[in-house]
Image: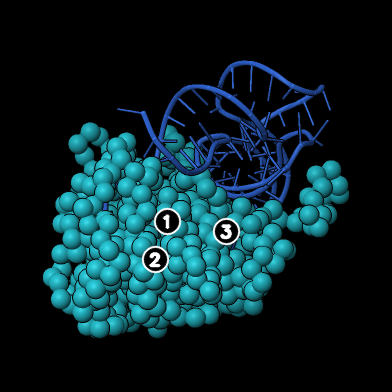
RNA sequence: UGGGGAAUGGUGUAACGGUAGCACGGCUGACUCUGGAUCAGCUAGUCGGGGUUCGAAUCCCUGUUCCCCAGCCA
């Protein structure tokens, strides 16, 4: 109420206050009213059972950013309540990915550290008659839950005396019963229209070794019981999560209220706010499907550059700045939509355009001999490292009599809109000379094997003293100086922007793009990158942004294409 | 015949009773030693039907469509 409303009719200069998304609007109000009497606290609660993808990055980006913007803090908490699925390895990978994205957590937490506290809360509920031990089989429990339209039925064990429940629960904990033989359930309402409220299971027996607590426990809390308590214990004020937990919120509220009933010191009651999870065109985001892609060999592992995993995107050459910019632009809402991959591409190009050094490299080499250039001569030409950043300086690029240019940059019989090299035509070699094609050399089958050209020594550096213009500038490399390289050209993993859109009886795999990876083994790159470290970003002039692959080394240089450059010529071609 | 959510250009997102705006995409053109970048312009939207109001994306009624929920997963 005290904040000035956004005046629509006022001076535009005064209207630049960015509008807040619905979550930040709530948090801002809460801060304004000092609702919590403490700085706000958020958390990102991954289960350490897999790799993070860009959908997670959206979620934890909100968690961290909201805390930061409103002067609070965000915890990283591993939701490790299922020892059968979780591994230490993922804890490290998740921490790395979050740090790579540039976020810092305040406290590193583990749900498993709260097992004792949760157990004590459970005992309190039993004592209040709000939880009971159920001896039914999993199948019986499922049957008793009813359906979406039919109410459930009470368990025959539902009205066990408190003392018996207490005794049984202790003995569950002590390991007296086998897995699956008994559970602890909340006593709520088996006819509740919300299935989550039909006496949900709180604890199951699992004689499994936990990656952190070892064999200390043989009963483990269910997510629904544990999650709200974890937030409570950490004093989380705003528990931000995805839409599918909206149905669970009444249960979390019920648990906290149940614990606080008749309790002298009530425990903290967080506020959960749900937002739509993130979808991206041309990819899948579910853990199950990503796992399937990896396990069935459709991609080469979790960090395959075609994967939407953060490790995959990192390997592909996406930068955290670009990903964050993208996620910011996508925004936060409750509408379940699908963001456009083209926007992601726009964001990487924008970032890399500013920071990536330019180099020249040829993917499909076509040999060019400059017939009037002295044999054996080499000269170093000055090339600008980044026209967007004068401070990046220049570098020398070797020029000699034999060069490579891109096969696509020559046509023997070009259409009118083709500006590049053709017989008799003059073009510029970037930072070098104007050359004119004088002869096309072919093999017996008529394939073009070599071009013979002349150069104009007066055009050194790329400008003609007489002021004459050329329509095209080509990238090139000196044959004798070029580095051999493998270049991986990545395209969309799926041919359909919605991989789930399939013919009857098919699944998303039928939409896999057979050309999602084109490996080019015969590439020629200028020598300046000989010692470049894996992960280094470049723009190959006129081709796109690339990054040195993880497995690249000076003896075997491998580049991954992050994204191509916008190419209006190519676009015109595909339109025809 | 259950409950919970959501619908604004092709896509994502603003506007919170007062001129439907921004970004990406698409399409023009300018400029250019990257057919890149940059710059300028154009394109295109309130799910349908009723109401309330001087005025509705916004409030009310009604219909439609889509998403989530029946793990001892998270």
Q: Is residue A360 visible?
A: no
- The residue where tag 3 is placed is A328
Do the residues at pointers 3 and 1 share their chain? yes
Residue A477 picture quarter: bottom left
Asked whether A245 or A303 is in front, the reply is A245
Observer-side mark, 2 or 3, equals 2
User: Can you say whether A134 is above or below A401 in the image?
Assistant: above
Please report the residue visible at 35 percent of the width from the left and 72 percent of the height from the top.
A123
* In the depicted structure, whether residue B36 falls above or below residue A495: below
Q: Which residue is mark 2?
A: A128
* Colour scheme in use: by chain
In the rendered image, which quarter contains the C terminus of chain A?
top left
Specify the colour of chain A: cyan
The chain assigned the colour blue in the figure is B
Where residue B15 sits in the image (x, y, percent)?
71, 43
On the image, the x and y values in percent for residue A316 come to: 39, 65
Q: Is residue A281 above or below residue A32?
A: above
Image disc number at residue A251: 1
Chain name for mark 2: A
Residue A313 falls left or right of residue A142: right
Q: Secondary structure at mark 3?
A: helix
Q: Secondary structure at mark 2?
A: loop
Disc 1, SS: helix
* x 26%, y 56%: residue: A158
CA distance for labels 2 and 3: 47 Å
Q: Earlier in the sequence, mark 2 or mark 3?
A: 2
């Amino acid at each position: 109420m005290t904040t000035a409303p956004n005046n629509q009719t006022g001076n535009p200069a005064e209207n630049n206050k960015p509008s807040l998304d619905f979550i930040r609007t709530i948090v801002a109000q809460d801060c304004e009213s000092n609702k919590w009497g403490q700085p706000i606290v958020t958390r990102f609660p991954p289960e350490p059972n897999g790799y993070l993808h860009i959908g997670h990055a959206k979620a934890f980006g909100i968690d961290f950013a909201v805390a930061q913007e409103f002067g609070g803090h965000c915890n990283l908490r591993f939701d490790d309540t299922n020892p059968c699925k979780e591994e230490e390895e993922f804890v490290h990978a998740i921490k790395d990915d979050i740090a790579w994205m540039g976020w810092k957590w305040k406290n590193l937490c583990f749900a498993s550290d709260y097992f004792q506290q949760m157990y004590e809360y459970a005992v309190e509920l039993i004592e209040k008659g709000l939880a009971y031990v159920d001896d039914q089989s999993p199948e019986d429990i499922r049957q008793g839950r009813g359906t979406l339209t039919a109410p459930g039925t009470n368990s025959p064990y539902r009205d066990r005396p408190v003392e018996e429940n207490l005794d049984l629960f202790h003995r569950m904990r002590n390991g007296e019963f086998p897995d699956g033989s008994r559970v602890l359930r909340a006593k709520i309402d088996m006819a509740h229209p919300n299935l989550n409220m039909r006496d949900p299971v709180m604890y199951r027996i699992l004689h499994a070794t936990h990656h952190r607590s070892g064999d200390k426990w043989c009963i483990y809390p269910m997510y629904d019981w544990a999650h709200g308590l974890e937030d409570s214990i950490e004093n989380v004020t705003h528990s931000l999560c995805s839409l599918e937990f909206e149905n669970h919120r009444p249960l979390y509220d019920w648990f906290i209220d149940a614990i606080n009933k008749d309790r002298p010191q009530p425990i903290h009651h967080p506020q959960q706010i749900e937002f739509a999870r993130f979808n991206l065109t041309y990819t899948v985001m579910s853990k199950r499907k990503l796992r399937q892609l990896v396990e069935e060999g459709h991609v080469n592992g979790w960090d395959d550059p075609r994967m939407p995993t953060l490790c995959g995107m990192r390997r592909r050459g996406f930068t955290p700045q670009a990903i964050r910019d993208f996620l910011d632009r996508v925004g936060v809402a409750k509408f379940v939509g699908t963001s456009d991959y083209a926007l992601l591409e726009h964001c990487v190009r924008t970032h890399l355009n500013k920071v990536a050094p330019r180099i020249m490299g040829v993917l499909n080499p076509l040999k060019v001999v400059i017939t009037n250039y002295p044999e054996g001569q080499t000269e170093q030409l000055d090339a600008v490292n980044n026209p967007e950043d004068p401070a990046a300086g220049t570098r020398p690029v070797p020029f000699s009599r034999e060069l490579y240019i891109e096969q696509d940059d020559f046509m023997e019989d070009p259409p009118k809109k083709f500006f590049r090299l053709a017989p008799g035509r003059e073009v510029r070699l970037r930072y070098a000379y104007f050359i004119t094609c004088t002869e096309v050399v072919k093999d017996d089958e008529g394939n073009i094997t070599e071009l013979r050209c002349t150069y104009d020594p007066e055009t050194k550096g790329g400008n003609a003293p007489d002021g004459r213009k050329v329509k095209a500038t080509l990238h090139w490399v000196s044959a004798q100086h070029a580095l051999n390289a493998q270049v991986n050209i990545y395209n969309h993993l799926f041919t359909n922007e919605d991989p789930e859109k399939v013919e009857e009886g098919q699944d998303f795999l039928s939409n896999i793009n057979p050309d999602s990876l084109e490996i080019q083994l015969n590439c020629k790159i200028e020598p300046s990158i000989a010692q470049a470290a894996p992960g280094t970003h470049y723009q190959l002039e006129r081709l796109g942004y690339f990054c040195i692959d993880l497995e690249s080394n000076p003896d075997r240089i491998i580049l991954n294409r992050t994204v191509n450059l916008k190419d209006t010529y190519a676009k015109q071609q595909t339109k025809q």
